[in-house]
Amino acid sequence: MQFTDQLPHRSLTVLAQDPSVSRGGRALTDTVTVPNEALSPGPKGHRIHVIDYDSSTDTHIAPLADGLDDDPFRDVSDIDALVGNPHFHAQNVYALTSATLLRFEEGLGRRMNWGFPSGAHQIKIAPHAFREANAFYTRQDEALLFGYFPSRRKTVFTCLSHDVVVHEATHAILDGLRREYTRPSSADQAAFHEAFADIVALLSAFRMENVVRFALVRGHRRDQRIIKEESIELDALRQSALAGLAEEFGSELTGVRGDALRRSAELKEGVDYLSQPEFQEVHRRGEVLVAAVMNTFLKVWTRRLEALNPVGAGKYDLDRVIEEGVTAAAHLLRIVIRAIDYTPPIDLTFGDFASALLTADREAAPDDRKYRYRKILQDTFAGYFIRPASSNGAGPGFWHAPRKDMTYGYSGYAEMRWDREAVFRFIWENRGALELNDDAFTYVASVRPVTRMGPDNFILRETVVECVQLVDVEARELAQLGVEKPGEMPDSMPVRLQGGVTLVFDDYGRLKYDIGTNVTGGNQSGRLKSLWQNGEFSREIGSERRFARMHRERAMKYSSYWQEQW
Amino acid sequence: MPGKPDRLTLKTYQVGFGDCFLLTFHYGETAKHILIDFGSTRYPRGAPRGYLKKVATQIKKDCGEDLLAVIATHRHRDHIRGFEGNSKNNGPGDLIEQCNPDVVIQPWTEDPDAPRNASGPSMGSREDVQSFVQSLDGMNLFARSVLPEVRHLFTPASAAAAAQLAFIGENNIKNKNAIRKLIEMGGNGRGHYVFHGGKSGLEGKLAGVKVHVLGPPTLRQSDEIRRQAHRNEEEYWHFQDAFWRFQAHAVRETGRRGSPLFPDAPLAGDLIGTRWFRTRLKTARAETLLKIVRILDDAMNNTSLILLFEIGDTAVLFPGDAQIENWMFALGKPKYQKLLKKVRLYKVGHHGSLNATPKSLWDLFEKRGGRGDPERLKTVLSTLGGVHGSSDRNTEVPRRTLVKALKRESDHMSTEDIPVAEMGRTIELDLS
C-alpha cells in the first residue's frame, strides 16, 4: 500500500487527565490526533519507541504485537481495565507524546528534531521506568522516564497523567529547539523550562473538549446543555477551570506534576511576585509565567464568549461555550509554541518571551482587531510585572527590525534556507552590524526553514537561525569586558560567558529580526550574579540528570549551602 | 581531685571508615573517660575477623573498665555499629556496657519518647516531632529497600554509582541491635537526649569543664534558620518529612503487595533492539537513586550531635558528621562564635567530606596557622579513602582541598596513617 492511500493522521484513545479524574468508575478519556505511521511493536514509530522496561524490578513487559494500526482501547471506558493494562499505558505515552510533537510541528511549520548528541531520531519512552514518584526527560539517555509508586491501596502511574506526559515531552521538544536553555543562566531561564512545559501541558488539556466540559459542569448532570451567565464570567471560570480542576486531580501526583494550575488561580495580578525572594526559586518563579499565560487564556476565552448570543435569559449553550474555550486554548497554544522561534538562543528572560509571544502572534495574524488577543496578553503580563523586553515594555512590545543595514549577497537566498556555512558567512560579514563579539567562539547552532499558515490563511515563510557565542575567561578578567564579578568569586575561577542571537529571515532572505544577548554585555553581570548565588559554579560535576534533579527538588524543596563547601 | 584537668588525651581508634574516640580528662592521677562513637562501615585493610570486638577489648582496657560517658553522635552504622551486643553477652557493645557508663548521650532525635517529650518551647509541636522522627525511620526503610534493587543495576557504566549506592545504602539501614543496646545502657535515668543550647548530661561530672551542645537544633530552631535563609519559605522540615514518610509508605506497600506490577502481562526476553536502552536505564536509575540516598545520608548526618568541651581558654570540638544545615544555628550566634575561636582540638566532621567543615567555621578557629605555635590547632580525621564519593565529581572523602588546608594550618593526624596492628593513636593537650 502506498502512503498516499492512507489518511495522514489517525486518532488514539488517551486518558484526558489521570485516573483520579473519573466518574462512577468511568474514565475521562479523549482521543488525540497522531501521524498515521507503520508501527512496530512497542509501539515503535519513526520518532518514538516505547520500551516497557522496569529498572526497579528488572522486568521487561512484551509489547503488543497485533492490532497496531487499530485503537484497541477505543471503546474501553472502565477505568480499572485501562489502569490494569500495561499496553494501554504504552499507547497513552506514545499517543500523548506523538500528539504533542505534531502540535509543535504544525505550530512551527517544520519537522522537529530531538536534541540528542547522537542525532537519534527516535526518543525512547519507558512508561514504568522505576518505582519512584518522579518522571523526567533525560537527554543523555535519549528518553522520557516515567515512574510509578504505591499509594493507598493502589498504584499511581505517572505515565497515565496527561499533564505529566505532555510536560516531559515538552521538555524534550524544547531541548531540541533551544539546546542552550538547559545551561545554567539567569533565574528566568532556569524557571522557563519548567514553566513552558507546564503551559504546554495545561493548554493542551484545555484543547480537549472533555476536559473543558468536565471543568465547567463537574458535580452537575452529565447531560447538561445550558450554562448560566454567571458561570462563564472571568472569576467564575478562574474558579472552575483553574482552581476547581486542580482540586479534582489526584493529590498523589502533586509532587510529580507540581501545582501550576492551582497557583494560576491563586497568584493575582497587580503583585510584583518576581522581585520577591520567594520567587527567585525556579519552580515558584515559573509559576508566575504560567499564571500570566493561563489568565490570558481565560480572558481570551471570555472575550470570545462576549460575541455569543444567549439561548435564554442569562443562559448560554454549553457546547458553544466549550467550543470557544477549546478554540482559545488552541490559538494560545499555537502562539506559545511559535514564540520559541522568536526567543534568543540563550539567556532568556520572561520579558523576551513576552516580546516573542507578541511578535509570533502578529506574524501569524496581523489583524488583531476582532478579539484583541495581543492587548489582552500584554495587559495580563503587565499585571504580573512581565514587560516585553523590546523597548523596555513600552509600545506594542514586538521585536524591532534590525537597527542597522545589513550586507547581503555573499550567500544566495536558497542556501541561506538550510546551509549553516552560508548563514555563517552572512553573520561574519555583518558581525559589526549585529554587534557580535569579534573575539568570541561563534557558531551557528541551527538553520531552520519554516512555512506557517496564519488563521487568515496567509502563508508565512521564514528562516530561523540560532547563532551562539562563548567567551572563556578567568573571573579577574571580567572587569575589562565590562562585566561585574560577583562579590566573593575568586579571581582565578574559570567563567564562561555565553550570548548569541536568533536571526529571523523573511521570504526574500532579508533579516527581519535579530534577537539576542551580547556575550560581553551588561546583562552578563546579572546572569553571573544569579549563577553564583544559586551555587551553579560549585555544583557537582558529573552526569546528574538535570530534570530528575529539578523535579525531585520540587518534591523536596531541597536546597544547600554550597558556599560553605570545600 | 583538682578543680580542673591538667591535660587531656584523645585516643583515636583505627576503625576504617567510621569514628571511635576515647576522650580522657586527667586530674592528676584521676582520669575521666568518655567514649565518643564506636562504629565502622568498612574495616581498614588487613583487619582480622571480629575486629570491632578487638577494638572494644582495647577500649575496655584503656578506660580501666570505667567510662564516665558514652556519646553516640547519630545513628549511622559507621558511628554506632560497635555498640551491637549478642546473646552471649560478649559482643563489642556488651564489652562497652561492662564499662558501666554513668551517662549515655545521644541527639534528641534518638529519644524513644521524643514525641511525648516534645513540650519545651524550643522543640516544636508534638506532631512535628513525631513526624520528623518517623521520617528518620522512613529514611532507614528506604535505604534498606534500595539494596535488593542495586544488585541488578550493575553495568559497566553504572558500576561506580551502584557501588556507592550499596555503600551509603548499607550505612543508612537501621542498626536495631546497636540502638537497643544504647537505649539499655541509657536506662535508669542515665540516658540524655540533647539539643542545641540544652543541657549535655555531663553537668557537674567534669570539674573545670563546661560542655556545650551546639547541635543538632530542634525543629523549631531549624525552621528559624530556614526562614532567615529563605524568607517566606514554608517550613523546611515539613517538606522533608512528607517526602520521607511518603517513601517509607511506598516501601511498605511494595513489600506488602509483593506481586509483580502486572501479574498477567507477558514478559519480553532479551530483545536485542532494546538492549542499549535497558543498559542506559539501569545506569540512570543507579545514578538517580544514588542522589536520593545521598540526600537521606545528609539528613541523617544532620541529626548529629555537635559537642564543644570548654576548659578555660581551650575548647575541644566533636561535631560527629554534622553538615552545614545542622551547623547554621550555632554559627549564627555570637556566643558560640566566641567559643569556637578557642578550639585547639578539632575532630574533623564527617570523615573529611566537602560539606561537614563549614568554611565559616574553619575561619573562626584562631589557633590554626603556621608551625611553631605550641598551642597550634590539632586536627584528627578518622576516615578511609576510596570508599565514599568520587574525585571525578569533587565529592571524594576525604576531600583533598580540605585535607590540604588541614595539613597546612594544623597539626593533623589521620587514621589512614595508623596501621591496623597499632589499632589506635593518642594525642595530648596540655591544659595546665
Image: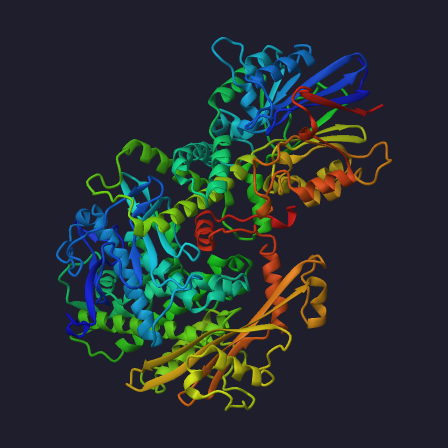
**Residue A454 visible (yes or no):** yes
| Residue drawn at 33 percent across, 81 percent down | A452
Residue lying at the far top in this picture: please name it: B88
Q: Is residue B294 above or below residue A511?
A: above
Between B35 and A96, the residue placed more toward the observer is A96
Number of on-image labels = 0
Say whether residue A382 is visible.
no
Instruction: Name the residue located 46 percent from the left edge and 52 percent from the top edge.
Output: A545
Give the answer, above or below, for where B77 lies relative to A406.
above
Q: Is residue B314 left or right of residue A209?
A: right
**Residue A136 screen position, x and y as percent:** 39, 54
The answer to whether residue A222 is left or right of residue B159 is left
Q: Is residue A467 above or below residue B323?
A: below
**In the figure, A162 relative to A469: above or below?**
above
Q: Quadrant of residue B422?
A: top right
Q: Name the image quarter holding the N terminus of chain A.
A: bottom left
Q: Quadrant of residue A375?
A: bottom left
